Each structure stands twice: as structure tokens, then as C-alpha cells.
Amino acid sequence: MSEREGVVSFGGEGPPIVVLHGLMGRARTWWSVSRWLTSYGHVVGLDARGHGRGPKVGPWNTEQFVEDLADLVKSLDAGPAVLIGHSMGGLHALATAATYPELARAVVTEDIAPDQRGRTVDTWRAYFDSWPPAFDSLAHVREFFGGTGDYFTECVEERADGYHLMANLEDLYQIAAEWGLRDYWSFVDKLSCPLLVVEGEHTAMPAGQQAEMASRAAGGRHLIVAGAGHVVHEDAPQEYRGAVEAFLSDVLKR
């Protein structure tokens, strides 16, 4: 497996741990987390379809993302994996563990809710329209995005006129549009492995759903991280690390 194919090995030995990014992201946004996560197993990142160096063709539905992730875990040929996902990646981790329980040892979700029906991509369009046509430098990217600037520097590539998001915006609109049309509670109810739900105090998700996820899933745990926004592992790295390490120390000794 190579980075060109959208798969990144961060190193480590032991049980497979797959990290999954959110919309607009890519596998390498997990680099800082992977530095301590490799103490618990072999950490692998996946560029989701339409992102980074992943395939740039649809379909753009959750079931396709599930198949992509299931194929990766199978290819590792090392038994069930711990699936750790932020936002969109958390949804894909949850759905894959529910669809293929034999492939998932445990799941960690970060700021994702199962029911966002009624939300539209119009807010996404307005947000992207606020971006400059191209960023002049990586420093420009960091300045524009502020606290998540380091995260977004991993998600852009240099072209002749400056830096651009690696993902195609129209593809992202299609991916996000599905979330406003269906709910995913059926995946939560089918989950049979341990689940850790990490929620930011200033979550971007509908209120109460993440706590309900943990209560409805077998072996679910829920944590709200004070002061954190949507990207908890960037906003509160030590609190995120402490929660995930405690969870892994438990589930990996079973």
C-alpha cells in the first residue's frame, strides 16, 4: 500500500488502528495523533474517496465509503481494527463496524451525530465562497484558518497560481448532501464492539445525539471536552489523547 493509493502507514506494531479524517481533510492530518497512537498498534491512515490521494470518482454515498474502509482492513490481514474517525470519518467508522462487525475491534468517533436531516449544503457553499481563489502560501493558509491552520495546510496542494484544497468542492457538496437526507441510527443500534464518543463542548452537531449514541450502543462511552470545537484532537490535544489512551488501554487488553 502506498500514499499514492490514498493509504498512509504511520508506523507502530501490533493490532491495526485505522484513522479516518473528516470532510475536506486527508489521512496526514492525523500525524500529530499518530505519534502517540503508534504505542498501541500499527497506525494506518486512509484518504477517503474524493479526498487527498484517494480515488476521485463516486458514488458519493456512505455505503461506498464503508466498502472502501472494509477493503482496507481486509488488506491489512491482521485481524479486526480499531477504527478512529473525526466527523465524516467517525460516521464511516461507525457504519463499517456495524456492517462488518468482524472487522472492528473498537470505534472512536469525534464530533459526529447520526441524524442531521434537514441540513443543506447551502451553508457549505457560502463558507467555501468566502475563501480566496487561491492561497498565496502555506502561511496564508494558516493565517486564514486560524486555530485549524495547521490542519488545513495538510489538505492543500500547490498549483501554478497558489495553494488549493486537494478535494473537489462539487464532490464534497454531494457527500455532505446525503447527511441532510437520511439518518444513521440503524448503524448505531447494530454496533457490537466498544464505542468511545468524543464530543466538543462547542460541537457542530445537533444537541444530545452524541450522548444518545453512547447510550444506545453496546459498551458505549461519552465524553464532552470542555472548550473544544469540532476538531477536538486539534483544539484539546491532551484531553483527546487522555480519553483515547484510557479507552484503548481497556479494549486492547481484552
Image (cartoon, rainbow, N blue to C red):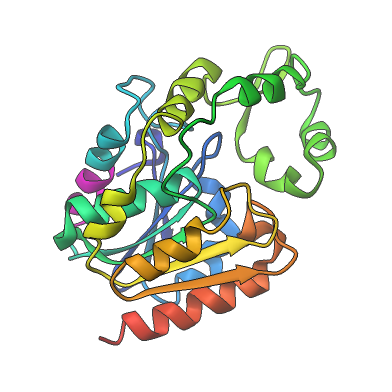
76 left or right, relative to 177: left
- Please say whether residue 76 is one of the residues in the magenta stretch: yes
- Please say whether residue 182 is one of the residues in the magenta stretch: no
Residue 175: image location, x then y, percent:
43, 27
Which one is in front, 17 or 205? 205
- The tally of labels here is 0
Instruction: Work out which quarter of the rendered image holds the C terminus and state it.
Output: bottom left
- Residue range (magenta): 69-77
Residue 38: image location, x then y, percent:
45, 70
Is 88 located above or below residue 138 in the figure? below
Q: Residue at x 68, y 22 (%)?
A: 128
Q: Residue at x 41, y 40 (%)?
A: 3
Is 20 located above or below residue 43 in the figure? above
Which one is in front, 7 or 182? 182
148 left or right, relative to 121: right
Is 249 located above or below residue 227 in the figure? below
105 left or right, relative to 134: left
Q: Main secondary structure of the magenta part?
A: helix
Instruction: Work out which quarter of the rendered image holds the N terminus and state it.
Output: top left
Q: Is residue 8 visible?
A: no
Which one is in front, 81 or 185? 185
Q: Residue at x 50, y 25 (%)?
A: 172
Q: Quadrant of residue 17?
A: bottom left
Is 57 located above or below residue 232 in the figure? above
Q: Is residue 98 visible?
A: yes
Residue 178: image location, x then y, percent:
40, 28
Residue 217: image location, x then y, percent:
32, 66
